[in-house]
Amino acid sequence: MARLFASLILLAALSLPATAHAQNRGEIARVQAGQSCSGCNLFQADLSYRELRNLDLSGSRLRQSNLSLVIMDGSRFDGANMSIANLFGARFVGASFRDTDLSDAVLVGTYFNASNLAGANLTGANLSGAYLSDVRGLTQHQLDRACGDADTLLPPGLHIADCRLI
């Protein structure tokens, strides 16, 4: 019986996620202080209400992070995981989101002036009221997987489904 109990405990411990997936408080603090941190684990980081210009967060894990009302002009998020993140009202002038996972992200009222969204995954993203008029790399295929509203500003020739209707 004791052997069975020990085996069950070992099996349960092995099935738990590795600590490598937990957030890294030191890396989060570096970014909050305005330092680049490519490839960092910023899971559930709170970067809201900050001015963090020209950071390189390429390849970082920002899943479920709060970037609401942040200013991150000129920053790079290429290949980052920003799924389920909150970017409400954030400003990204000249930022790069190439091949970034923005699935299920809240992008309501986000300002993407002159940003690069080539290859970004927008599946399930809410782009209501977002400014995308002059972004680069945005395709109809990406927008077909997202939703927005009448206030979503898109490049000429592109359209988006209304979130209230889906």
Image: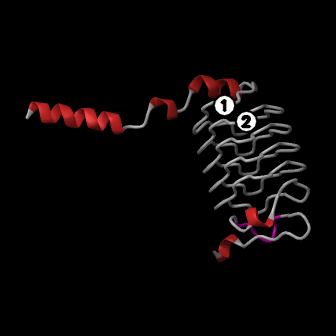
Q: Left or right: 137 with respect to 162?
A: right
CB under 8 Å between callouts 1 and 2? yes
Q: Position of residue 89 (x, y in %)?
A: 76, 51
Label 2 sits on residue: 58
Report the front residue among 163 and 36. Answer: 36
Closer to the chain start, of discs 1 and 2, is 1
Q: Secondary structure at mark 2?
A: loop
Q: Quadrant of residue 109?
A: bottom right
**In the picture, which quadrant includes the N terminus?**
top left
Write the start and end of the magenta stretch as one range. 147-152
Alpha-carbon distance for marks 1 and 2?
Answer: 6 Å
Estimate the x, y position of residue 48 in percent, counting from the top left: 69, 39
Measured along the vertical axis of the image, is residue 161 above or below residue 88? below
Q: Amino acid at mark 2?
A: Ser
Mark 1 highlights which residue?
39
In the displayed structure, 160 sits above or below 29; it is below
